[in-house]
Image (cartoon, rainbow, N blue to C red):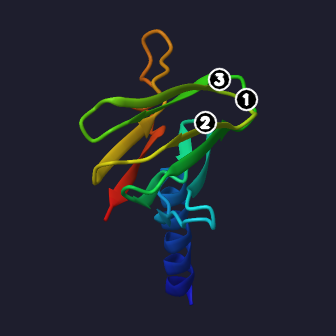
Amino acid sequence: MRTAILALLAAVLAAASLFASGEEALYRATTDADGVQRIAIVGGNYFFKPNRIIARVNVPVELSVRVEPGMIPHAFVLETPQGDKVTELKLGGKAQTVTFTPKRVGRYLFYCPNKLLFFKSHREEGMSGYLDVEE
């Protein structure tokens, strides 16, 4: 009985650790009736949810990005697989929307570039994710 309780406790702690690290299930964008892939992203204390997204190439993508209420300012940068900026937004409680059509297959990185003095950047603290564009 004690072994079963310890095993259950270990499983719960492992799940909590995975959740706290910002890891989450893969989000696959679906195309709305108007032909646009719409994705809502919420940021907060050093996270974006979802942080792993799959979308299709040559199909418009509309990202709606906002942050949870808080004192720490955040931003959102999206880069192409080649490192070119698609957008850079200052974030607030009201969602901001950016629409673009990915023309190449690959991994588009998004992150918060903010940093305070000598501390790690928000990106280094885990406030990042990616949009994998596939055929």
Q: What's the distance in space between the residues labelled 3 and 1, CA to CA?
A: 6 Å
Question: From the viewer's perspective, is residue 79 above or below residue 7?
Answer: above
The answer to whether the residues at label 3 and label 1 have Cβ atoms under 8 Å apart is: yes
Residue 11 is situated, as x and y percent measured from the top left of the image, at 50, 73
The total number of labels drawn is 3
Question: From the viewer's perspective, is residue 35 above or below residue 102?
Answer: below
Question: From the viewer's perspective, is residue 124 above or below residue 9?
Answer: above
Which residue sits at x=32%, y=62%? 134
Q: Amino acid at mark 1?
A: Gly
What is the secondary structure assignment of the residue under circle 2?
A: loop
What is the secondary structure assignment of the residue under circle 3?
A: loop
Residue 12 is situated, as x and y percent measured from the top left of the image, at 56, 70
The answer to whether the residues at label 2 and label 3 have Cβ atoms under 8 Å apart is: yes
What is the secondary structure assignment of the residue under circle 1?
A: loop
Which residue does the numbered mark 2 point to in the structure image?
A: 45
10 Å neighbourhood of mark 1: few (<14), some, or many (≥20)? few
Which residue does the numbered mark 3 point to in the structure image?
A: 72
